[in-house]
Structure formats: structure tokens, C-alpha cells
Amino acid sequence: MDFELSAEQVAIRDTIRELVQDRVAPRAAEIDQKGEYPKDIERLFAENGILGIPFPEEYGGISGLSVTICMGIEEIAKACASSSLILAVQALGSYPILVAGTEEQKKRMCPPLASGERVAAYALSEPGSGSDAAAMQTRARKVGSEYVLNGTKQFITHGSVAGTLVVFAQTDGGSDHRSISAFVLERETSPWKVEKLEHKLGIRGSPTAQIVLEDVKVPAANRLGEEGAGFKIALAVLDRSRPGIGAQALGIAEGAFAYALNYVKEREQFGQAIASFQGIQFMLADIATQIEAARHLVFQAATKVDSRAADLTKIAAMAKLFASDMAMKVTTDCVQLLGGYGYITDYPVERMMRDAKITQIYEGTNQIQRVVIARALLR
Amino acid sequence: MDLELSPEHQAFRDSVREIAQGVVRPLAEEVDRDHRFPVEAITTATESGLMGVLIPREYGGAGLDAVAFAVCIEELAQACASTAVIVDVHTSVGTEPILLFGDEEQKRRWLPRLARGEILGAFALTEPSSGSDAASLQTSARRNGGGYVLNGSKVFITNIGRAGLYVVFARTAPDERAAGITAFLVPGDAPGVRVGQVFDKMGLNGSPTGELLLENVSVPEANRLGREGQGFAIAMRALDSGRIGISGQALGIAQAAVDEAGELMRANGHERSKSDEDVLDPLAGQGDDFSLADMATRVGSARLLAYNAAWRCARGLSFTREASMAKLHSTDTAMQVALDALQIAGEEGAGAGSPFERHVRDAKALQIYEGSNQVQRFVIARDLLRS
């Protein structure tokens, strides 16, 4: 097992770390308070090649490795979970193309995403189809050399800001997982409608959209894989993206802990720093241990994505499950370490606690991760 | 042994529930969203006598006991946690010190107005550099002729700006720690009393929390509560029963989360899944069933612990350790149960305006205020090791 980063990865991490420190961290509280998508951060990431991380060099990117993606997401999430989704969702929306696209499709679709000229999104969930993805109702009817899409997609991260949207829909009049197909929509030629944006507990700077598709025409050349291959593609994508959510959770927890650790060293009660109390020390020890355990699981899962390991599905689910549960617990405890100051918005940890919750829910709720893990064990 | 509420307590609970569900609950979402004081809810609570639950009838209150108080806060919190903490702080730490330590004249002067809800009570102990270490507080009370002059700043004061009377703790002897603290009754409109920053918080958005600034505030001797140097003991006693109220608030939030999660599962046809043959079917839902069972079990145990503390208090038995245990366990339960309920609700539950996400934001405060749960553990351990 080797979690050592290559020289290139270290260089990428240091670049991100510096950008995050200088440009993202100072914006994080405002992004949360205003609940606005930080277009400036998106541009910053585009200009500095960060949006190219999910892509190999041959498609205009700088890495394409899950370890690098997770490292990047983690670094950004330490300061701002909303901003970390700019990279995480770029990866999520691009995976279907990288996993199932033809050489022609990859060469055509990836470079504008890798350069950050466009951002991507991924539309699987529907109002009546969350954990049960196979129950989706969105339909794609073949008409000549095009498909015509109709339906509603729910909880689509960046659905309102994306230029490229991967949509899953039922083809050939089918109604189960065997008839789902995947399509790449480009906003200019296949415009979708944003019905509403959700107001949320956390990650408020990352727009979550309900999307309506009304007779949206998509060229057949933008179908990924065969008709009916969509469900398999969706599952393969989630295997690859779940370590990224684990990395996001990890970063949120690390950010909260770094703040709380500094706080308990400075805050004095009973004539000494509260860090000198054993009750506080035990909390610190538990938090640091949980973070360390999650980090290893997340990067082990990322390594398995990159090596296409046979047990990837199970380990990716474990990483997402463990890291997100860890982040919820750790951020709740970090608010506790700051006491009353932790609960007010002048300090960042309450935001981090609110941001952590979604990592237990999206890209497969943690209940679904448990189902996935149990299946892998029992089969 | 009888673990049921008495018929009188049950009747009282039912009457509070009617108000809570009928008037308070419909306001909860808006109060949270707009960060506004729930005027209508407090008016209704006032008209229904809920602002004077613990105050004896001779002073215009309802003359009920700590069990009724816990039940009252629990029912209100089940509808709206912000409303519950406003009433809770008023009733316990804002009023009880007068009831327990005031002289006859102070009781006659203040209790009827507090009982009738004419004025709202508040409790000002914490300072920027004095939280868990309350004995280190720096607000000063200097003798001046027939009275005192108070100077200092208090922080995290519930009911800030709304309160007509603050129970303020200040130092009368600079060189002593706990023994140098004295309690004072300071009207909200006294010259020199100012509201500083009102905090934007994660939750409990309907309940204002902020800084109380005291600048050369003259307080007559008649407004000193208890003896000079008795203040710390008064604060600790007030917090003991305050913790019963916070336990009730925690139970209310937790019960609401359990009920709403159960309702959602039923609405989604969850009970059908019990006959499902494929236990690996992601929709078989046993995971959510088990989660709901754990949640309800936790709330049940927390309620017994809270009612036990309230019952001991009502009986005149020692209850410091029991109140701390109740506060610790019920607030940890509320946090866990609120998170679990949101998890069952999934992404829909994370949307603002959903009660599930509100419960999570509200519950967190309870692990922190009226003695953080670290302080509760300290109190419990000290009590265990002393006896």
C-alpha cells in the first residue's frame, strides 16, 4: 500500500493549498451567507488548471487520477465545502464521458471541460426516484438521428450553472434499469429549464436545481454507450465519485478541527487553556483518530479507482459512509469545543457542521452505502 | 413506584399541547426563516398562564411544580424550539432566583408581573472570557451610597433586548472568586443598560441571543438578590432547575423528530416493506425501521431521566446530579435523533423550511447552553466522587 503522492501531485496540492488560503478561505463565510454560486472561484479554478484535474493529458487535462481529484477536493473543502463541489461535480459530470464515451466523444467533449470553459453536472435523481434510481420516469424517444427527452430531474448540483449535463433517461419505451440510457446535453443545442433552486441546510453556495426537460433534442452522437447501458454507467460513475465525497467530508472535518484545535489552545477558563483539560484532550484525540482513519479509507478507495480494483465498489462505499459519518460527528464536536462561539455565524465551524450533513445524504445516502457493502459481503 | 404523570399533570400537558400544536407550531417555520421573535406564540403562552408555571398562586402564578414545568417546555419545544427556550429562560433562570432567594418585597414587586408575562425575564451570567468558568466573571458592582454601580459586559444572553428584567451576576469583592459574586435585579430600561451585538446563530433563530452592556448602571440595594457573595450559589441553584427545562426542550425537539420521521415513513408506504422477501432490496427499509426504533428508545430513556430529575426537584429532594444527567443525556439524544431523522428524510429533509433540518440546527445549541455538556460531566463526576 502506498499513499505517497508523486512530485506532480505534491505540486498540484501546494498550488491548490495556496489558492485556497489566499482566495477561497476569505470568501467562504460570504458564499454561505449569500447562498450564491461563487462564479469567481469557478473562474479561479479554471484559470489555474484545477478543473482539468479529472482529465488525462490526452483530453486536455492534467491528471485524471482519483487520488489527485480527492486530494484537490479535500484541500478546497478544508476552507469551503461549497467551492469544493466545483471540482467534485466537474469530476462527477465528466466521469460518464470518460467511463463510457467513445474516443471521438472524449476528444470532442472533454477539452472544454478540462480547460474550465464549461462546467459539468450529472442528472440521475428524480422527484420519485432517489435511492431507487431504476424507477426513473424521464423518457428519451428516438426520432431520426436525434433523441427527444422529457422529464424532471431533482437535486441536480450545478444544474443551473452547467454547460454540459449528463442525463439518464428511459429509452425504447422501457421502465426498468435495463432500458436506461445516458446522454450528454450541451446547453446551447439542448437547452434545459431550471424549475427551481433549493434553499438548504448547508453547501449553500452550491446551487441545487430541479431541472425540467421539455422536448429537449439531443443528437444520437451524444448518447454514451449503447441504449440500455445507462444504469451500468451510472453505477460505474458512482463507484468513482464516492471517494470524492469521502474526500469532501474529510476536508470539512479537517477544516473544522484545525480551527477548533487552535481555539482550545487559546481559550482560557479556570486560569488555563481549555486544551489542558483531560475532557477536552480526549475529544481532540478521538477527533484526530477518526480523521486519520477516514483519510486512509478515502485514499485507499481512490487508489482502487485508479487501479480498477475488483473490490472497488465495496471500498468506495465504505470510504463514503465512514468519512461522511465521521465528518458529521467531528464537526458537531468542533462546534462543542467552541461552546457558544461555535453556535454563532461569526465563527466558521457551525457552517462546517451544516455542510457536513449533506455528505451523508448525496451520491447515495449512507443507507444505500450500507446496502452496497452488505451486498458485496453476502454475494 | 409510578412512572406515569399524575392525572393533573396529564390534563396540564394536554392543555399546553393544544396551544403548542394549534398556535405555536404553525409559526415555527416562519419564525426560523425570518429570524423573528414569536410574538403571537408568547402572547398566547402569556394568556394561558404559561409564563408563571412555577410561581405560587399568591404571587399571581399557576403554582405548579417542576414536573409541570418540564412538561410545559417539552410540549412547546415539540412545536417550536425557539418559543420553548424563550419561555424556559423566563420561567426558570429568569424568575426562579427571585422565587427562591428574593425577600418578600422583591417577590411582591416582581413575581406578579413576571407571572402575568407583563415583563420577560432573563439571566446574565456568562461573559466573553467567563463561560464554563463562571466564577471568574469580571462585571463589577461597586458600592455607591445606598446602592451599587454595575459595569461590564455579558454575552450569549437569551431574551436579549426583549427582557424587562435581567438577573445579573457581578463581582462585589475583586479578590475572591465565587465568594465575591453577588446577584442583582436589573430592569431592562435602567439607564446604562444597552444591548450590544445580537448574534446570528445556526439555529433557535426566533430567540434573540446577544450582548448585554452595563455602563455605570445604578442599582438600589433593594434590587440586590440575597446576600453579598451569595450570587454564585444563586446562579448554580438556578441552573440546576434550568437544566430540567432544557431537558424538556431537548425531549420536545427529539419527539418531534421521531414523530415526523415516522409520519414520513408511513407516507412513503414504509410498513409494506415488512413482508418483503428480499432483505437486500434497498427498499426493504429495515435500516430505517431500526434507526427509528433506536431514536424512539433513546427519547424514551431521556424522558424518564428528565422526569426523574423534575420529580426529585418537586419533592424537595437533592437533584443536582440528576438534573445534569438529564440535561447531558437528553440534549445528546436530541442532537443524535435530529440527525437521524434528517438522514431518514434524505435530501428532501435538508431543504430549508423542512422541519428536519431545523431540528438539527436547533438541537445543537442545547449541548452548549446552561452549562455545556462537558460541564455536566464535570458536575456528575464530582458528585459521584464526593459521595
Image (spheres, rainbow, N blue to C red):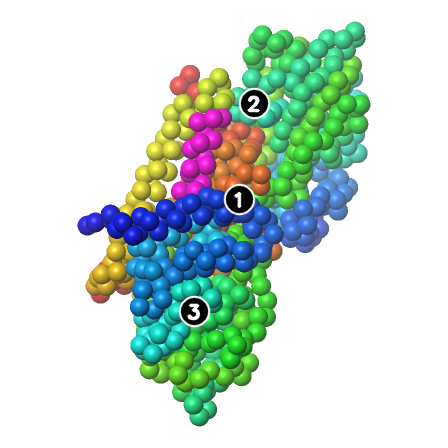
Quick check: is A261 in the magenta stretch?
yes
Residue flagged by tag 3: what amino acid is it? Pro
Q: In this view, does A173 lie to the left or right of B89?
A: left
Q: Is residue A367 left or right of residue A26?
A: left
Total of numbered circles in the picture? 3
Residue flagged by tag 2: what amino acid is it? Ser
Dot 2 alpha-carbon crowd within 10 angstroms: few under 14, some 14 to 19, many 20 or more: some
According to the picture, the residue beneath numbered tag 1 turns out to be: A26
First-in-chain label (1 vs 3): 1
According to the picture, the residue beneath numbered tag 2 turns out to be: B130
Q: Distance between the residues labelled 3 and 2?
A: 56 Å
Q: Which residue is drawn at 48% across and 17% down?
A: A271
Q: Distance between the residues labelled 1 and 3?
A: 29 Å
Which numbered circle lies on residue A247? none
Q: Is residue B170 left or right of residue A69?
A: right
Q: In which quarter of the image is residue A369?
A: bottom left
Quick check: is B135 in the magenta stretch?
no
| Coordinates of residue A84 in the picture (x, y in percent) | 44, 54
Dot 1 alpha-carbon crowd within 10 angstroms: few under 14, some 14 to 19, many 20 or more: few
According to the picture, the residue beneath numbered tag 3 turns out to be: A112
Q: Is mark 3 on a helix, strand or loop?
A: helix
Residue reaching furthest to the bottom: A144
